[in-house]
């Protein structure tokens, strides 16, 4: 499946934020470090719970082959494996439009593609995987799920339920939230 105009616009508009997130959050390094893992998994719980609050209701209402799932529930199970209680869910305002909600879901669903790669690399490096099942929640169904999301994105644009501008706005909002949530707090910022 070639990239739709909406997916291409999302990728182009969020490329710098995606790259900055990877640099700032150092996700793989922090998940490999037993001393940092729990805080990173807590951050992922905040991210997914927030994204779900902002976007899932509007995306679930769209007609199409994809329905969002609550990844925060899987992260909460991983936190239990790490002997940490999941915090109360984050309450973010809902996305303003279905298009913006699709942009948020793009960020959250895209993280499963990277998460799957990170989990494989950690396993290959001999790291234990306790608390990391959320990185690959769909297993062999990951590709199928991603294609279903892409099809919904195309359908929403074709049906007029969303515009590319709205989707890009939501994607930028989702990445801004991911960066604020997943990047570690610097010692100077915490002081």
Image: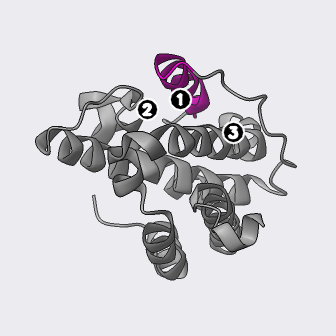
* Label annotation for residue 134: 2
Total marks placed: 3
Q: Is residue 49 magenta?
A: no
Q: Are marks 1 and 3 in contact (CB under 8 Å)?
A: no
Please tell me whether residue 176 is drawn above or below residue 30 in the rendered image: below
Q: Secondary structure at mark 2?
A: helix
The span from disc 1 to disc 3 (Cα, nearest Å) is 13 Å
Q: Secondary structure at mark 3?
A: helix
Give the image location of residue 100, x and y in percent. 72, 60
Foreground of the two, 172 or 120: 120
Give the image location of residue 170, x and y in percent. 69, 63
Please tell me whether residue 2 is drawn above or below residue 188 in the rendered image: above
Foreground of the two, 151 or 94: 94
Residue beneath disc 1: 75
Q: Earlier in the sequence, mark 2 or mark 3?
A: 3
Residue in the picture at 44% in, 76% down = 19
Give the image location of residue 175, x and y in percent. 61, 65
Give the image location of residue 172, x and y in percent. 65, 71
Q: Are marks 2 and 3 in contact (CB under 8 Å)?
A: no
């Amino acid at each position: 499946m070639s990239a739709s105009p909406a997916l291409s616009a999302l990728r182009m508009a969020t490329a710098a934020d995606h790259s900055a997130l990877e640099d700032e959050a150092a996700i793989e390094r922090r998940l490999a470090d037993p001393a940092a893992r729990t805080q990173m998994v807590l951050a992922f719980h905040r991210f997914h719970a927030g994204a779900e609050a902002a976007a899932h209701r509007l995306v679930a209402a769209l007609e199409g082959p994809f329905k969002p799932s609550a990844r925060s529930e899987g992260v909460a199970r991983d936190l239990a494996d790490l002997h940490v209680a999941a915090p109360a869910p984050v309450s973010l305002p809902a996305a303003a439009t279905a298009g913006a909600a699709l942009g948020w879901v793009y960020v959250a669903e895209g993280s499963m593609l990277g998460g799957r790669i990170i989990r494989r690399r950690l396993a290959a490096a001999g790291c234990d995987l306790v608390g990391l099942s959320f990185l690959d929640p769909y297993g062999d169904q990951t590709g199928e799920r991603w294609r279903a999301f892409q099809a919904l994105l195309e359908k929403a644009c074709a049906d007029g339920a969303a515009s590319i501008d709205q989707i890009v706005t939501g994607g930028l909002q989702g990445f801004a939230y991911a960066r604020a949530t997943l990047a570690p707090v610097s010692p100077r910022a915490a002081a």
